[in-house]
Amino acid sequence: MTMTSAHDGLTRERYGRSADERADRVLKVVGAVLGVVFLGIVGWFGVSYVAGTKVSGELIKFDVASDREVAVHLEIRKDADVTGVCTLSAVAEDGGEVGRADFTFDQKRTRIDEVVTVRTAGRATTAQLVGCTAVDGS
C-alpha cells in the first residue's frame, strides 16, 4: 500500500466522504429523478395526443389520370363511430393549387382504404393530403 492510498483510507475513516463525493451522489440522484419525470411528461403528452386524434389519414399514392383529374389512394384510420372528413389538394408544376376536395368517410370501420378522384382546373403534377378531421367535434 502506498502512502497516498493509506492516507486516503485514514482520512475517509476519520472524516467520512469528501464534499465532492457527496455532491456527485446528490447530482446523480437529482439527475435520475429529473430524467424519470421528463420521460413521464413526454409519454403523457404522446398518449394524450394520440388519444385525442380521432381521424387520421395517409396518402398512399396518386395517379394523374388526365388534365382534369387526379386519382388518390387514401388510408383512413378512425374510431368506428366517428365520421371523418379529409381534404385533398391537387398541385400544378408551378406550385399553384389546381384542385381541392373534401371527402367524407362515415363507414363503421376503423380502417378504410379508398381511391377518390379530385377534379382539377388544370394538369396537376402532385396530390397532397391537407388533413383529416372529425365531423361535429367528434
Image (spheres, grey):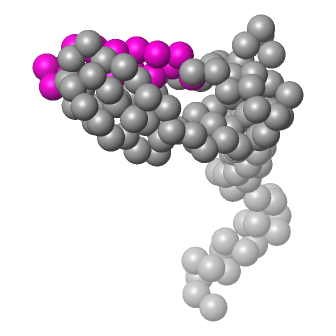
Residue 72: x and y in percent read 43, 36
Which is nearer the eye, 113 or 6? 113
Pinpoint residue 24: horizontal percent, then vertical percent.
67, 51
Is the magenta region chiefly helix, strand or loop?
strand
Q: Which residue does the image show at 77% across and 8% down from the upper left?
A: 136
Q: Residue 48, located in which quarter of the rendered image? A: top right
The residues colored magenta run 86-102
Q: Quadrant of the N terminus?
A: bottom right
| Quarter of the figure with the C terminus | top right
Frontmost residue, 56 versus 26: 56
- Is 60 placed left or right of 9 in the picture? left
Question: Of all residues shown, which one is farthest toward the top?
Answer: 136
Examine the rendered structure and indicate whether residue 36 appears above or below residue 18: above
Residue at the image point whose x is 71% and y is 18% from the top: 134
116 relative to 27, above or below? above
Residue 124 counted in the magenta span: no
x and y, in percent, of residue 67 in the image: 21, 26
Q: Residue at x 77, y 40 (%)?
A: 110
Q: Position of residue 45 (x, y in %)?
A: 72, 30
Q: In this view of the protein, can residue 53 be seen by the observer?
A: no
Left or right of residue 100: residue 56: right
Q: Quadrant of residue 118?
A: top left
Along the line of sight, the residue nearer the viewer: 103 or 82: 103
Whether residue 96 is in magenta: the answer is yes
